[in-house]
Amino acid sequence: MGKVISLINLKGGVGKTTTTVALAEFLTLEKRKKVLVIDLDPQTNATVMLINQDAWKRANDNKRTIHQMFLDKLNDTDYFDIYKSIIKGVSSIGGGIPDLHLLPSSIDLLDVQDRIPMINQMNSFAQSPITVLANYLTQQIIDEYDYILIDCPPNLGVITLNGIYLSDYYLIPVVADILSTYGIPQIKDRINKVSVNIKSINRSYNIKPLGIVITKYRMQSRMHRETRDDLILRSKLAETDKRSVPQVFKVYVKETTRISEATDIDVQINTLKQKYGYSQEVYDAYENITNEFIRRVK
């Protein structure tokens, strides 16, 4: 049975998309898992890290992106086909990883995102605008994969809630500073409130926090050290305490300027080690985070 995990933070630039893609590539190549990445972010960063711009343009022109999925619901059309829209064998590694698939996003999503809350404003929660993705991503499709990773926009709007509605867990990548960790309680509180509504029609719904992954960590930075220690302390507080946060992953990804090179789809790479092994510490960090991820997802 496939597990669905949303990656979310209210602030951009925290390594959310890089973490999504790295997890997907380590899960497929190191752990032999089958993974689908769903890019819900209008910035389309996960998409262009996994396919080149020509492939994205073909998908966009052929109405095979998340944008068309929402647009169909707004216009009462039927162009979007999820089976045709899922791109198989994506990644910059080895010309593509057979078991890594992508449901791409589109910058055009920016043009419709403000209208999405108007979708199906009827009297049934099942017709809510937060269930659009769930209408297409059936349990049958979910069970074709070991893991589905959803790269969410940096907000708690209706597009993000489409991911939350489907998810078994949510994972929060952060930089160890005040701004990128400030919104963690809001994420937890908002998801808890949405969960109450979802449970009113789906009693089995039980999304759980998977944890916090610290990225771009600088050991020499006092702010990073103090923020990390504060997060660890707050993760031990009672769940009812408003200051509490999910558990922090034991390994952190250190900051390096070469991570941006690893995310370039046009750089031809043959192996996982070649892509992330520019720093043994970074490679080991992603490998250990992947191991901890698997242990936490049950």
Image: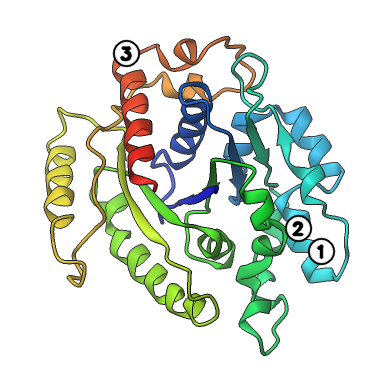
Disc 3 marks a residue whose amino acid type is: Gln
Work out whether mark 3 precedes mark 1 in sequence or the reverse, and give the earlier one: 1
Mark 1 surroundings: few (<14), some (14-19) or many (≥20) residues within 10 A: some
Q: Residue 249, position in %: x, y?
A: 26, 41
Q: How is the image coloured?
A: rainbow
Vertical placement of residue 120 versus 9, above or below: below
The answer to which of 17 and 147 lies nearer the viewer is 147
Contact flag, marks 3 and 2 (Cβ < 8 Å): no
Q: Is residue 200 left or right of residue 297?
A: right
Q: Is residue 248 left or right of residue 112?
A: left
Q: Residue 143, position in %: x, y?
A: 61, 48
Q: Residue at x 31, y 28 (%)?
A: 288
Which secondary structure lies at badge 2?
A: helix
The answer to which of 130 and 16 lies nearer the viewer is 130
- The label shown at residue 69 is 2
Mark 2 surroundings: few (<14), some (14-19) or many (≥20) residues within 10 A: many
- The label shown at residue 280 is 3
Q: Residue 110, position in %: x, y?
A: 67, 56
Spatial CA span between label 2 and label 1: 5 Å
Vertical placement of residue 106 versus 137, above or below: above
Contact flag, marks 2 and 1 (Cβ < 8 Å): yes
Spatial CA span between label 3 and label 1: 46 Å
The part of the image, by quadrant, that contains residue 122 is bottom right
Disc 2 marks a residue whose amino acid type is: Met
Mark 1 lies on residue: 72
